[in-house]
């Protein structure tokens, strides 16, 4: 894949923040509007975790996990406008979104060899005409030269409520109080890990989405893109 000089030939918009702040939906909508590529970096950590679970690899076996991450057999396919994710030929689009895989992903993501193994794979998504990169360390580590970095937040309570709705849509049942505890535990783990912790880049624009709906957030970000002459 061609390596482009960052920010010269194609803009990168990074959208970081904790789970449930709306990054996934917002990133997808902006990528669609702009006709840009989309990197869902969380999916790569989820795929590494699911693959480990399926191959009987412990979520703290850094060496085996980084080999797993390096050699992930993954296909991101767009079908009828929807993204399908295949792991070793198996459609895991829904399976990787479960709470169990999310928790395992958060543990796997704390291991530096796993993060290193996934770094180039993430940068390979950077292609003209532009990229929206969604994650935790897009603006701080993976694309530090991005010309627009957004840090999306929302209260833990609001994020737990959104997560419950999402799980219900894929037919999973959950308790709001349990989800809230899990969200707080995952935030703590993502923010306190030694490597690439979840935090806003120094030059990030912070947006609190607790009181905003999705179209409002999309509009604010697209206005920023226009103000910076990125579209
Ligand atoms: O965004 P998500 O819920 O799909 O991410 C799953 C886990 O992967 C999350 O707990 C943190 C981790 N992650 C990460 O460490 N770095 C990223 N760039 C994206 C996700």
Image (cartoon, helix red, strand yellow):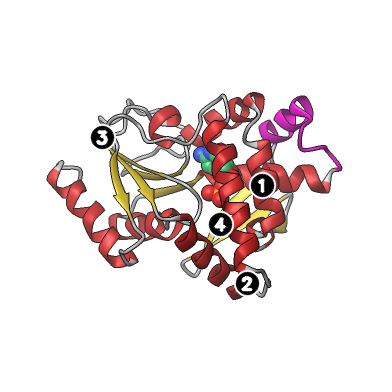
The quadrant holding residue 194 is: top right
* Sooner in the amino-acid sequence: mark 1 or mark 4: 1
Whether residue 166 is visible to the viewer of this picture, yes or no, is yes
Residue at 37% from the left image edge and 58% from the top image edge: 26
- What residue span does the magenta drawing correspond to? 56-71
Q: Secondary structure at mark 3?
A: loop
* Sooner in the amino-acid sequence: mark 2 or mark 3: 3
| Between marks 2 and 4 in the image, the one whose residue lies nearer the viewer | 2
Labelled disc at residue 77: 4
Q: Ligand 1 is in which quadrant of the figure? A: top right
- Name the residue that disc number 1 marks: 47
Q: Secondary structure at mark 4?
A: strand
Q: CA distance from mark 1 to mark 3?
A: 29 Å
Residue 177 on image: x %, y %: 61, 64
- Name the residue that disc number 3 marks: 147
Residue 229 on image: x %, y %: 14, 42
| Between marks 2 and 3 in the image, the one whose residue lies nearer the viewer | 2
């Amino acid at each position: 894949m061609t390596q482009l000089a960052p920010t010269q030939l194609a803009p990168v918009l990074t959208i970081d923040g904790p789970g449930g702040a709306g990054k996934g939906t917002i990133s997808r909508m902006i990528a669609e509007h702009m006709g840009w590529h989309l990197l869902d970096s969380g999916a790569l950590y989820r795929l590494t975790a699911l693959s480990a679970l399926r191959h009987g690899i412990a979520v703290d076996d850094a060496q085996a996990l980084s080999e797993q991450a390096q050699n992930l057999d993954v296909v991101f396919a767009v079908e009828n406008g929807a993204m399908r994710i295949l792991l070793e030929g198996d459609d895991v689009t829904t399976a990787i979104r479960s709470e169990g895989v999310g928790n395992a992903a958060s543990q796997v993501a704390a291991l530096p060899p796993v993060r290193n193994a996934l770094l180039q794979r993430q940068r390979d998504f950077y292609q003209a005409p532009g990229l929206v990169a969604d994650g935790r360390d897009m603006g701080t580590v993976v694309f530090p030269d991005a010309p627009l970095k957004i840090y999306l937040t929302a209260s833990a309570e609001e994020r737990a409520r959104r997560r419950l709705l999402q799980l219900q849509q894929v037919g999973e049942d959950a308790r709001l109080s349990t989800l809230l505890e899990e969200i707080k535990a995952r935030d703590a783990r993502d923010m306190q890990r030694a490597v690439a912790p979840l935090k806003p880049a120094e030059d990030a624009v912070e947006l609190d989405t607790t009181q905003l709906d999705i179209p409002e957030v999309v509009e604010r970000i697209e206005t920023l893109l226009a103000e910076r002459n990125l579209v």
